[in-house]
């Protein structure tokens, strides 16, 4: 068997950080850079890891460092670590900004540079060990950090398919894949998140399946779970070789993706 998925525990650590940089890739998708001495030693073993990020209210005149208790009392949401430097104490995250909704997205878009935040975790990791014969990665913008991390560990000779449902144009999101990994960008229907992605997965037949052991990662709005699992059946992909999950649920701000 060329690869397996293994669970690895991690020590749960809470880390005060501050916002030092933001860059909008599209009008509603932003990458932020966090720094802090507490990030020294940070690590994330799995591409689909979750950390809990705490978002205190802040404005341009109120960026004084907060106590750990104040940070812990702040609203929080789960996100996937994108990139980090454990020696320099740096962590990068990406956020989808849902208009005027969403505590996390608004903080990422509007909080003043220097604003405090908190990071907890990851509590544990699902680690891909070995090398799949082929890859299927599918998701929306909320899954893009995990997809980036999977792509980043691919060999240059990897084969596979990446399908992403998003509001912007594919070139805006800066995803570079090996030559034989095809990327399809789908324009999201704002009224029906994951519907276009689900239709694309439903259109993949058994004849589209690459040969060998395929690793599948599928994550988006909760509606993607049913067509994602149906595709695993058509492609005869064992559940132990796949991750299929709803990263968020429409109309439910406190929804947490299963770990």
Image (cartoon, rainbow, N blue to C red):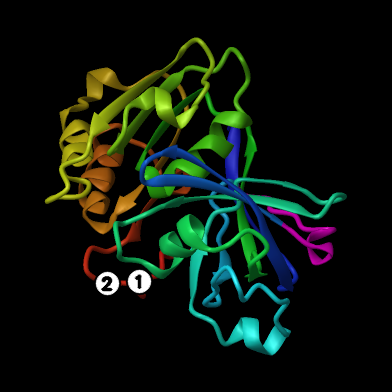
Mark number for residue 236? none
Of the pair 70 and 9, the residue shown nearer to us = 70
**Residue 242 location in percent, x, y?**
43, 44
Q: Is residue 102 above or below residue 57?
A: above
Look at mark 1 in the image and give the residue it sits on: 255
Q: How many marks?
A: 2
Q: Residues within 10 Å of mark 1 (few under 14, many from 20)?
A: some
| Residue 41 is a magenta residue | yes
Look at mark 2 in the image and give the residue it sits on: 252
The alpha-carbon separation of the residues under discs 2 and 1 comes to: 6 Å
Of the pair 248 and 99, the residue shown nearer to us = 99
Does residue 133 appear to the left or right of 222 in the view shown? right
- Residue at coordinates 55% horizontally, 77% vertically from top-left? 56
**Residue 169 location in percent, x, y?**
32, 27
Residue 9 visible from this viewpoint: no
Q: Is residue 41 above or below residue 5?
A: below
Q: Residues within 10 Å of mark 2 (few under 14, many from 20)?
A: few
Are the two marked residues, 2 and 1, in contact with CB atoms closer than 8 angstroms?
A: yes
Q: Please state the extent of the stretch shown in magenta in the rendering.
A: 35-46
Image quarter where the N terminus lies is top right
- Residue at coordinates 54% horizontally, 82% vertically from top-left? 74
Determine whether the residue tagged by mark 2 lies in a helix, strand or loop: loop
């Amino acid at each position: 068997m060329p690869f397996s998925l293994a669970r690895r525990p991690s020590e749960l650590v809470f880390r005060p950080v501050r916002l030092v940089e933001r860059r909008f890739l599209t009008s509603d998708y932003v990458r932020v850079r966090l720094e802090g001495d507490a990030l020294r030693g940070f690590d994330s073993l799995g591409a689909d890891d979750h950390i809990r990020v705490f978002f205190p209210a802040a404005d341009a005149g109120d960026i004084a460092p907060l106590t750990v208790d104040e940070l812990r009392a702040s609203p929080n949401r789960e996100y996937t670590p994108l990139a980090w430097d454990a020696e320099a104490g740096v962590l990068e995250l990406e956020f989808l900004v849902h208009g005027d909704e969403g505590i996390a997205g608004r903080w990422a878009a509007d909080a003043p540079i220097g604003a405090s935040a908190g990071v907890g975790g990851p509590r544990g990791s699902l680690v891909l060990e070995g090398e799949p014969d082929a890859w299927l990665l599918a998701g929306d913008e909320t899954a893009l950090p995990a997809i980036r991390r999977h792509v980043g560990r691919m060999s240059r000779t990897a084969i596979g398919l990446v399908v992403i449902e998003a509001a912007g144009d594919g070139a805006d999101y800066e995803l570079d894949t090996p030559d034989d990994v095809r990327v399809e960008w789908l324009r999201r229907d704002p009224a029906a998140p994951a519907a276009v992605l689900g239709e694309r997965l439903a259109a993949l037949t058994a004849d589209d399946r690459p040969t060998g052991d395929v690793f599948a990662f599928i994550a988006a709005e909760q509606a993607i779970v049913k067509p994602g699992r149906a595709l695993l059946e058509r492609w005869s992909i064992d559940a132990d070789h796949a991750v299929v999950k709803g990263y968020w649920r429409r109309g439910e701000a406190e929804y947490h993706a299963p770990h």
